[in-house]
């Protein structure tokens, strides 16, 4: 019993000493902090004057904290997608961009600029913080792409994908002739698509031309000279190349011949206007001739061209009619398979009907598994299934895609899907 009061007494005696030691530790810690903050000069005298803290420390600490928070926000918050203007108006993703009779500028918020030639048609189908995906439906554009460490730009041209980081080039596509031309001025790009044998790099000073109908391509140094005009098509009653007699009039001389004969010049037909990339005028001419009648009697190749003319003229119902006629009148042909692909792309891009789009892309792949649009069709299947929430289906398509096209334009998306398993 006598030991317990003695222990309590010792604790009472030791409490002031503990408090003094704790105070000395706080003072020492405070002095060490002040010395480090002032580059080594001590402030012991100021510390002994009382418990007041230097007022300049709080703003400095606050500024440092603010800087850390700002850095974290840059890392954690999603980056803003690029915006763009078409001419003097604000651009909208997915909206047709049509240059009528004069070039049309398209300017992006990162400094990238496009210039569509007269009668060219394009769409910005997607944007993010690093770039955009641009669909060139027809005609010619000039691009100057701003380069950053993470910039990624894709240009879809028919069955081709042009992957760009930063460069300057001219790109054109003729749907009627299924011909691509790419002239590289600066930088380099990678082109994927039929006849390429995998992504093909095109460097500054080179020109790539691809002729799908002829199943050939040319990669040359410098811009090639203009191709010679094609020979006149053979028609009943036309003289053979070796026959004597006056040479047939050139297409541009028809008005002169008609004038000399005293007749009114024949207005250009819809095919002539397509050859000049004047799609809206071609659509007007086709309607004047009777669009439904053309659809009923046109060849498979002409039906696909009519569908392009209607799409580029903002008449998707007319385009669908031409494509559906191709499917029914020329079932089993290569043109019918291409019609299925275009029906799928219209459903995907214009109506956001992903189930219908997946069905049409699947039809194309079933009929033309090694066709010129197969790589793009399978990539679109991945996107359709992902957008519909079918994760397992999207991953299945991603595995097929990577097995067939490990360096294709949809490979990165496919790999990300599989990494999430």
Image (cartoon, rainbow, N blue to C red):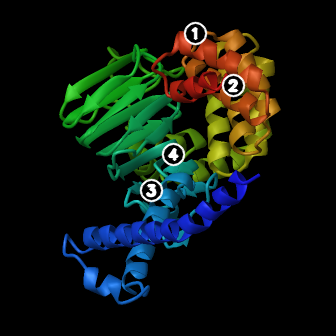
Q: Is residue 297 left or right of residue 7?
A: right
Q: What is the spatial separation of the Cα atoms under label 3 and label 4, in whole angstroms?
A: 17 Å
Q: Quadrant of residue 342?
A: top right
* Disc on the earlier residue, 4 or 1: 4
* Disc on the earlier residue, 3 or 2: 3
The residue identified by callout 1 is 370
The residue identified by callout 4 is 134
The residue identified by callout 2 is 381
**Place of residue 55 in the rendered image (x, y in percent of width and height, measured from the top left):** 40, 87
Q: What is the spatial separation of the Cα atoms under label 4 and label 2, in whole angstroms?
A: 19 Å
The structure residue drawn at horizontal position 76% and vertical position 13%, both measured from the top left corner, is 331
Instruction: Check disc 3 and report its element: helix, strand or loop.
Output: loop
Instruction: Check disc 1 and report its element: helix, strand or loop.
Output: loop
Question: Does residue 42 sit above or below 275 in this rendering?
Answer: below
Q: What is the spatial separation of the Cα atoms under label 3 and label 2, in whole angstroms?
A: 33 Å
* Disc on the earlier residue, 1 or 3: 3
**Place of residue 271 in the rendered image (x, y in percent of width and height, measured from the top left):** 56, 38
Q: Which of the numbered marks, if any, corresponds to residue 118? A: 3
Of tags 4 and 2, which is closer to the observer? 2
* Disc on the earlier residue, 3 or 4: 3
* Disc on the earlier residue, 1 or 2: 1
């Amino acid at each position: 019993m006598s030991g317990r009061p003695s222990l309590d007494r010792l604790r009472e005696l030791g409490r002031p000493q503990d408090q003094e030691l704790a105070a000395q530790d706080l003072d020492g810690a405070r002095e060490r902090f002040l010395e480090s903050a002032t580059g080594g000069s001590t402030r012991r005298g100021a510390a002994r004057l009382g418990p007041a803290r230097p007022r300049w420390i709080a703003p400095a600490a606050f500024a440092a904290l603010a800087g850390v928070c700002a850095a974290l926000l840059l890392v954690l918050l999603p980056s803003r997608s690029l915006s763009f203007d078409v001419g003097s108006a604000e651009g909208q993703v997915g909206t047709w961009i049509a240059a009528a009779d004069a070039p049309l500028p398209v300017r992006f918020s990162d400094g990238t600029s496009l210039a569509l030639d007269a009668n060219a048609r394009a769409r910005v189908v997607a944007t993010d913080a690093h770039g955009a995906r641009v669909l060139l439906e027809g005609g010619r554009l000039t691009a100057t792409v701003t380069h950053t460490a993470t910039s990624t730009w894709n240009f879809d041209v028919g069955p081709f994908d042009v992957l760009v980081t930063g460069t300057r080039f001219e790109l054109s596509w003729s749907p009627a002739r299924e011909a691509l031309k790419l002239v590289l001025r600066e930088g380099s790009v990678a082109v994927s698509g039929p006849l390429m044998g995998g992504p093909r790099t095109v460097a500054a000073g080179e020109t790539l031309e691809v002729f799908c109908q002829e199943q050939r391509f040319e990669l040359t140094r410098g811009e090639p000279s203009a191709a010679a005009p094609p020979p006149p098509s053979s028609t009943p009653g036309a003289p053979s190349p070796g026959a004597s007699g006056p040479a047939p009039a050139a297409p541009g001389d028809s008005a002169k011949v008609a004038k000399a004969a005293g007749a009114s010049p024949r207005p250009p037909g819809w095919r002539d206007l397509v050859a000049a990339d004047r799609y809206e005028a071609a659509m007007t001419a086709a309607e004047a001739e009777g669009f439904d009648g053309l659809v009923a009697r046109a060849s498979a190749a002409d039906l696909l061209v009519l569908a392009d003319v209607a799409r580029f003229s903002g008449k998707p119902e007319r385009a669908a009619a031409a494509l559906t006629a191709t499917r029914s009148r020329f079932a089993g042909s290569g043109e019918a398979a291409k019609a299925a692909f275009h029906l799928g792309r219209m459903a995907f891009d214009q109506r956001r009907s992903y189930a219908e789009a997946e069905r049409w892309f699947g039809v194309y792949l079933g009929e033309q598994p090694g066709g010129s649009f197969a790589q793009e069709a399978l990539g679109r299947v991945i996107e359709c299934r992902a957008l519909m929430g079918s994760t397992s289906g999207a991953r299945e398509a991603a595995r097929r895609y990577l097995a067939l096209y490990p360096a294709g334009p949809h490979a990165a998306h496919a790999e990300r899907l599989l990494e999430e398993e």
